[in-house]
Image: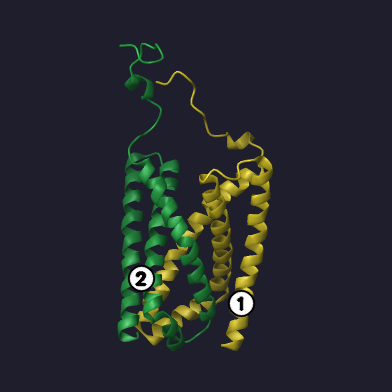
Amino acid sequence: MASHPRPIAPHLQIYRPQLTSITSILHRITGIFLSLGVLPLIYWLVAAATSTEAFDQAQALAGSIIGRTLLFFWTGAFFYHLLNGIRHLAWDAGWGYELTTAYRTGWTVFIGTVILTIAAWALGYWARGNV
Amino acid sequence: MANAKGNLRSDLGRVRGLGSAKEGVRHWWVQRVTAIALIPLSLWFVAGIVFLIDVDRATAIQWLGSPVTLGLMSLFLIALIYHTVLGLQVVIEDYIHSHAVKLTLLLAIQFAGWGLAAAGIIAMLLITIYGG
């Protein structure tokens, strides 16, 4: 065995949440949630390849209240995971470890997620009425 | 035999228990390569799909059926599913401690992931070749 004690994960029951820990666990939660989105994505593509009836059914499911709600949260999860993923890649490149920078980029991810999610849906509804 | 630091423990003895040296580097690297690829590919996908809300099949196939869409969508699906399988693998390894359950889940996400990727790419090929 190594002569020094190995670092251990924080005990979550007594660990005060902070922006850096919240953004970290949200990256994992959005990742798992986005994984589930692969299923409807493939179903939608297969339906488009199959028949008009199959595709209409897929579009109706996507357009239902539950469908739209799920798609809205998938959009939010996507932009969060994308922006925070870029933050992770910056860390991998050795940039952004200073506490003030980590907090600034963390807030940027949250604000960017809200803006891009609303923008994507606004664009979608605008296109729906115009294309 | 003493090592460079004058410690009597062998190099092997020193590193034992410090963690795996199996294939973590490859996992880490491919996770990053697919992440970088997914930045433009996923933005392209979302920008395309946003215009397909409520459209009928003929309109959807106009976009889906172009060779450019076939190429980019195939790359997107491969990068997406590779990234997803690697990500879920870490989650399973972190939280599932029963060896049998862990192994079963790891196999399941591999098979399900690549099965879904194949289905998606075949669907795209059919749409491009036959127009759906």
Do marks 1 and 2 share a subunit? no
Quick check: can you spot residue A19?
A: no
User: Disc 1 marks which amino acid?
Assistant: Leu
In the image shown, does B21 or A121 lie closer to the viewer?
B21
Which residue is found at the position 35% from the left and 80% from the top? A49
Please give the residue where the numbered disc 1 appears in the rendered image: A123
Please state, as top left, top right, bottom left or bottom right, where the N terminus of chain B lies in the image: top left
Residue A119's spot in the image, x, y percent?
A: 64, 71
Quick check: can you spot residue A77?
A: yes
Local crowd at mark 1 within 10 Å, few (<14), some, or many (≥20)?
A: some
Residue B6's spot in the image, x, y percent?
A: 39, 11
Picture layout, residue A85 above or below residue B70: above
Which residue is found at the position 31% from the left and 63% from the top? B115
Residue A43's spot in the image, x, y percent?
A: 40, 72
In which quadrant of the rendered view does residue A116 lie? bottom right
Q: Which chain is green?
A: B
* Label 1: which secondary element: helix
Picture layout, residue A42 above or below residue B58: above
Please give the residue where the numbered disc 2 appears in the rendered image: B120
